[in-house]
Amino acid sequence: MDFDLIVRVYPFFIDAAGVTILLSALTALLGLACGALGAAARLSRFALARFVGATYVSVFRGTPALIQLFILYFGGPQIGIELDAFEAGVIGLGINAGAYMTETIRGAIISIDKGQKEAARTLGLSRWQAMYKIILPQAARLMVRPLGVNLNMLIKATALVAAISVVELTYTAQRYIGSTYKPFEMFLLAGILYMIIIYATGRAVAWLDRRVQIT
Amino acid sequence: MTDHKEFVQIRHAQKSFGALEVLKDISLTVERGQIVAIIGPSGSGKSTLLRAINDLDPLTGGEVWLDGVQVNRSLPFRQYEKHINQMRQDIGMVFQHFNLFPHMTARENVTMAPKMLKGLSKDEADALAREQLDKVGMLERIDYYPSQLSGGQKQRVAIARALAMKPKLMLFDEATSALDPELVDEVNQVMKKLAEEHMTMIIVTHEMDFAASVCDRVLFMDQGVVVEEGPPEVVFKSPEKERTRAFLRKHLEGAR
């Protein structure tokens, strides 16, 4: 184990971890947006919207995220989509994560007892009023933990964008292996940094979950 | 408010789920201030009929009228939504399983709809919550969450929530069926109080004693039809129809 080497390259890995965190954050935001839209589509009263939502979920959960990234980044220019590697990474992973989040959000919403909606509608609330005032506040509390699981998966999935040459943690580790021939140290260092990021987000999710519970 | 003698009118109500016909041509008139109990075995369609009155379970045929306005008008979706939301403000409903909003305190449960739909200010809403919760004897628990209340207390808050919209009509769908026996009375007391204030009420219930003591009229339903109806003295004491007698006999045995 070459500790001197680890100490020497460590600052570069910290920078790369910053990229991984930024990538994860942007992916999570895009994923949440896609997930919210996807869930709205899947729960729509219009059959076409439900079909589009269901298709979105089955396509993006039914194919490898890596293939999706390759199609977007390498195949995109062929159909007029020119993105740099980072953009392609955020968009590709975000849309992919959104498919999983669609199911998380939808699951939380449909698990709310239908008596809640009935009580709200009986008082004279519209469908939308019942949704945002009664159903969503309760569903949101149920979503925190499963969305935390989605977030955990998403952070780990950011390693995939190394394959389209985004300079994040995994790519940085590979690059330093090229010059140092020390894969054990380099991947270990990357792994530890991933774990710190994931541990921290896990704690944040647990804290948020406790905070939003109904007394 | 016009004074229609037929305050609530159900005309030829019919409801099917596929091939299963759960309501078969039911007509019913309730006058303002009247209290009508609907009794009958489970699966008789009594809850379905009640839930058709505010269109929670839409009828497949027939009409429901409240105070001269048809509730289940046939309108394009958006217009219908607007119409039914307006109608429902006048029709309070109390459910078997309370359906209180668990993320809101008793106060918030009561004030949510009036604030949102009638634009009450915070002070007005607060006064309303106190008034309604006091009426059901729950004022001292105004800032409790539903999870901190007993079943009977929850149901009383649910009644206050419905009353806060100042409805013209109250529907009770087995309001005491989910309660422990010792908690039934506190809810019945509240309903009696409403009866004394001449609130128009339609009550689906399994409690014959309560029905007999507060109702002006009793409907016995079985298999989607009204088998017998009349004043409680008649329906309970000397029913004409054999089916009614059989039901009451069975029910009284069960209660013992």
Image (spheres, rainbow, N blue to C red):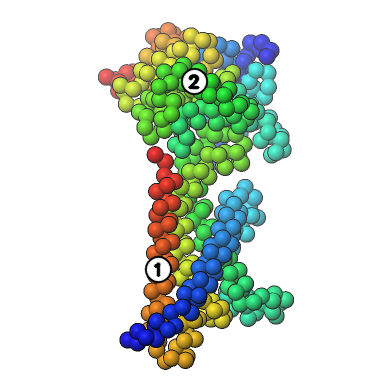
Q: Secondary structure at mark 2?
A: helix
Gap in angstroms between the C-alphas marked 1 and 2 = 51 Å
- Number of other residues with Cα within 10 Å of mark 2, as a class: few under 14, some 14 to 19, many 20 or more: some
- In which quadrant is the N terminus of chain B drawn? top right
Q: How many marks?
A: 2
Say which residue label 1 marks: A196
Say which residue label 2 marks: B130
Q: Label 2 lies in what chain? A: B
Question: Which disc number belongs to residue B61?
Answer: none
Does the image show residue A155? yes
Does the image show residue B227? no
- Number of other residues with Cα within 10 Å of mark 1, as a class: few under 14, some 14 to 19, many 20 or more: few
Q: Of the residues shown, which amino acid type is indicated by label 2? A: Arg
Task: Identify which residue is drawn at 37% across, 86% down.
Answer: A4
- In which quadrant is the C terminus of chain B drawn? top left
Q: Secondary structure at mark 1?
A: helix
Task: Identify which residue is drawn at 38% across, 34% down.
Answer: B147
Q: Is residue A18 left or right of residue A71?
A: left
Determine if marks 1 and 2 fall on one subunit. no
The image shows residue A18 at horizontal and vertical percentages of 51, 71
Quadrant of the image occupied by residue B112: top right
Q: Of the residues shown, which amino acid type is indicated by label 1? A: Ile
Task: Identify which residue is drawn at 53% across, 24% down.
Answer: B126
